[in-house]
Image (cartoon, rainbow, N blue to C red):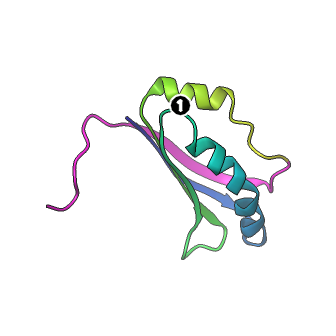
């Protein structure tokens, strides 16, 4: 399992437009084989920050998604980003 997690920084006045333009892209991405979840959300503290979380069953599923992603264009400029890919060896409940 792979987790892609991090943040994108856009101008605060562009954040709502950025997120609005991604909603259809997120729906299409979530429907792809191997996509467990895909979320882009406004950070509740930093006005220009967008939090990103993707969970994929395998590297192959992620590669297939990236080959056909077709993100919306044009998009407001990303000023900075810090996004990492994590390979997960095991998964279990947090509580209990």
Q: Please provide percent x and percent y for residue 66.
A: 63, 31
Q: Is residue 64 left or right of residue 24?
A: left
Q: Please provide percent x and percent y for residue 54.
A: 50, 46
Q: From this viewpoint, which residue is outermost toward the top? A: 60
Residue indicated by mark 1: 62
Q: Is residue 34 above or below residue 74?
A: above
Of the pair 23 and 81, the residue shown nearer to us: 23
What's drawn in magenta, residue-wise?
A: 74-96
Q: Is residue 91 above or below residue 76?
A: above
Q: Residue visible at 51% across and 28% down? A: 61
Total labels drawn:
1
Badge 1 crowding class, 10 Å Cα cut-off, few under 14, some 14 to 19, many 20 or more, is: many
Q: Please provide percent x and percent y for residue 93.
A: 22, 54
Of the pair 54 and 28, the residue shown nearer to us: 28
Q: Quadrant of residue 19?
A: bottom right
Q: Is residue 67 left or right of residue 70?
A: left
Q: Residue visible at 83% across and 46% down? A: 73
Of the pair 3 and 45, the residue shown nearer to us: 3
* SS label for mark 1: helix
Q: Quadrant of residue 50?
A: bottom right
Residue 90 within the magenta-colored segment of the rendering = yes
Quadrant placement of the N terminus: top left
Q: From this viewpoint, which residue is outermost toward the right? A: 74
Q: Residue visible at 74% across and 62% down? A: 20
Q: Is residue 84 above or below residue 67?
A: below
Residue 79 within the magenta-colored segment of the rendering = yes
Quadrant placement of the C terminus: bottom left
Q: Residue visible at 67% across and 68% down? A: 48
Q: Please provide percent x and percent y for residue 7.
A: 56, 55
Q: From this viewpoint, which residue is outermost toward the bottom? A: 45
Q: Is residue 7 left or right of residue 25?
A: left
């Amino acid at each position: 399992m792979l987790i892609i997690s991090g943040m994108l920084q856009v101008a605060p006045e562009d954040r709502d437009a950025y997120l609005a333009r991604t909603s259809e892209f997120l729906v299409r991405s979530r429907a792809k084989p191997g996509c467990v979840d895909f979320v882009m959300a406004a950070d509740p503290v930093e006005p220009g920050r967008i939090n990103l979380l993707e969970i994929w069953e395998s590297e192959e599923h992620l590669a297939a998604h990236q080959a056909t992603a077709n993100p919306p264009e044009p998009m407001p400029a990303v000023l900075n980003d810090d996004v990492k890919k994590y390979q997960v060896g095991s998964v279990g409940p947090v509580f209990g």
